[in-house]
Image (cartoon, rainbow, N blue to C red):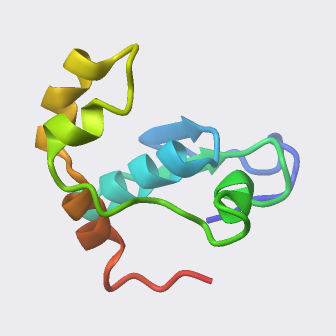
């Protein structure tokens, strides 16, 4: 549910409130809603969710790449190379592609 009214008008109980309608916030909200019966509310300061994602990549909305090897991918992040190997193994570029496949996005 997207509520554009002041908070006093939208007084409902939510199990999870995500602050920020960017890529991570929307991803977290969708994943929580799909994996549980919890009610989720996303709060975004701007008028539209995912604004920055839509303009990334020159308007092509780049969300992933074709580098499927976690070690090779982490090498592109010099300040966090070793720390990112674990997370990239747990949720890879292929997992990102699978997550978006089958969903309708405008």
User: Does 21 appear above or below 53?
Assistant: above
Q: How many marks?
A: 0
Quick check: 26 left or right of 102? Answer: right
Residue under the image location 42 percent in, 41 percent down: 15
Query: Which image quarter: residue 97?
Result: bottom left
Quick check: 105 left or right of 75? Answer: right
Which quadrant does the C terminus fall into?
A: bottom right
Q: Is residue 49 visible?
A: no
Which quadrant does the N terminus fall into?
A: bottom right
Quick check: 3 left or right of 73? Answer: right
Closer to the camera in the image, 1 or 26: 26
Q: Is residue 13 visible?
A: yes
Percent of width and height locating residue 65 = 37, 60
Residue under the image location 30 percent in, 60 percent down: 96
Closer to the camera in the image, 78 or 100: 78
Percent of width and height locating residue 7 = 80, 41
User: Does 11 appear above or below 50?
Assistant: above
Closer to the camera in the image, 103 or 62: 62
User: Does 52 appear above or below 24?
Assistant: below
Percent of width and height locating residue 68 = 19, 56
């Amino acid at each position: 549910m997207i509520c554009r009214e002041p908070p006093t008008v939208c007084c409902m109980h939510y199990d999870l409130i995500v602050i920020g309608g960017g890529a991570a916030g929307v991803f977290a909200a969708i994943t929580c809603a799909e994996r549980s019966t919890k009610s989720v509310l996303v709060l975004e300061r701007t008028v539209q969710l995912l604004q920055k994602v839509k303009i990334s990549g020159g308007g092509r909305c780049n969300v992933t790449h074709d580098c499927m090897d976690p070690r090779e991918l982490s090498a592109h992040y010099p300040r966090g190379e070793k720390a990112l190997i674990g997370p990239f193994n747990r949720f890879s570029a292929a997992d990102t592609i699978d997550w978006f496949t089958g969903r309708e996005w405008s």
